[in-house]
Image: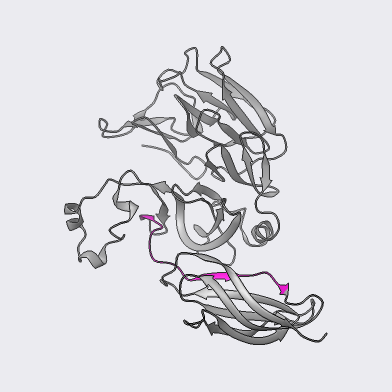
Amino acid sequence: TYTASESARWHFDVYGYNIIAVNVNDGAQRFLVGTDSAFSSLAGPTDAHLVSVWKDQLVVGALTDNLEGVQWSEINDITDWSGGNSDTQVFPGFGRVTAISRGNTPLIVQEYGIQRGVFTGTATVFEFDTLTEDLGCRITGGTAFVGNRAYFWSDRGFKSITAGGDVQDIGFGKVDRWVAENVNLASDYQFRAASDPQRPFVYFACVAFDRAPTTRYNTMLAYNYAIGEWSRVDVDVATVMAWTQDATTLDGLDNYSGGLDSLPFSLDSAAWRSAAPLFGGVSGADKLGQFAGGNKAATMQTGEFEGAAGRRSRMSRVRPLIDGPSTVTHRGRDNRSDEFSVLVSDAPVFGRTQEARINRAARYHQLEVNTAADAAWTLAAGIEETVRPMSR
């Protein structure tokens, strides 16, 4: 009976034991866990694209009668939208609301601006401040929140902003250029952002031109905000998010046929515990899953560098700082106008020295460490190389 569509997608959040779902065509729906057997209409709020929770109040945003507005409920009562602490606020001139954070000091992300709300407890209920007037996110779902910070894709690249208004360029340079050259921002599947509930990562799923499929997310950019580094992952997913499932006891393992070796997760995985959400999503085959399988094949690549300032140098040995098996590829060139050529491919790392022998000369070097799919490793920290200057 619902009429959700590509332009009126479902958006969910949780208020207490209530699961709240909205799409602009059908209005707000609620499901009371432990009581309801189906969703039913939640009377009161304006039809909207987005839903969130501001401490004790439910909020909807991108309203059907004003895409620049948000509306919130009475305190501790999601059925009362006309009481003294409920209200509507419109932020004109900044475009459609595309994301709303949770918490007591929420961020409201719009296409061309970002607002901050502060609960006052007075007649105004919330006081709003404009943090940016020309910077926002035009993609609904293109923003991920971690604490009081938002991570998002803007017309000027990847940014982050705190509730205090501190803006950082987190993708400036290579990452933003890669997106501009490789990501289909005109696709129905633009960026879908989500945060990892257990590790310091935010993820941006997107559609890259040079990969299949093109009707779902085929690439995921992962940003480690603890160290400020990016990586890229090949995927095939319809969406990404953090989720959890009912706890499974040892007796419940009987539901998985094939014995212990066929279990989808290791016995110590958080996937068996209902209180520990993991990062996952919905696959291209419409299966709900978590990113908790074996390691994918991985590549760690340096930028180009001179081994000796102003002259050629000979690369003799490379030591990958990784706690697992790997091989090393070395590329080099003599002039900036030259293309990098592979000088040594898949050099093995010897177990005794943990080094790969290269013995190749070039003016500019580039190194690449590769691990095979399902290889056992957990940490890659960098590369140590041994070079010596040569004549000019």
Which quadrant would the N terminus be assigned to in this image? top left
Q: Is residue 204 above or below residue 334?
A: above
Q: Is residue 322 above or below residue 388?
A: above
- Residue 355 quadrant: bottom right
Instruction: Tell me if residue 231 is in the magenta stretch.
Output: no
In the image, taking residue 218 as reference, residue 364 lies left or right, namely right
Expressed as whole percent of the image width and height from the top left, the position of residue 194 reads: 50, 47
Q: How is the image coloured?
A: one colour
Expressed as whole percent of the image width and height from the top left, the position of residue 59 reads: 49, 27
Farthest front residue? 352
Residue at point 16%, 53% (across, down): 251
Q: Is residue 204 visible in the rendered structure shown here?
A: yes
> What is the total number of numbered labels drawn onto the structure image?
0
Expressed as whole percent of the image width and height from the top left, the position of residue 339 reads: 73, 79
Q: Is residue 63 visible in the rendered structure shown here?
A: no
Which quadrant would the C terminus be assigned to in this image? bottom right
Expressed as whole percent of the image width and height from the top left, the position of residue 263 reads: 26, 62
In the image, taking residue 306 as reference, residue 347 lies left or right, namely left
Residue at point 51%, 50% (across, down): 200
Magenta-colored span: 288-305
Q: In this view, does 183 lie above or below 350?
A: above
Query: Foreground residue, 194 or 375?
Result: 375
- Residue 381 quadrant: bottom right
In the image, taking residue 185 as reference, residue 337 lies left or right, namely right
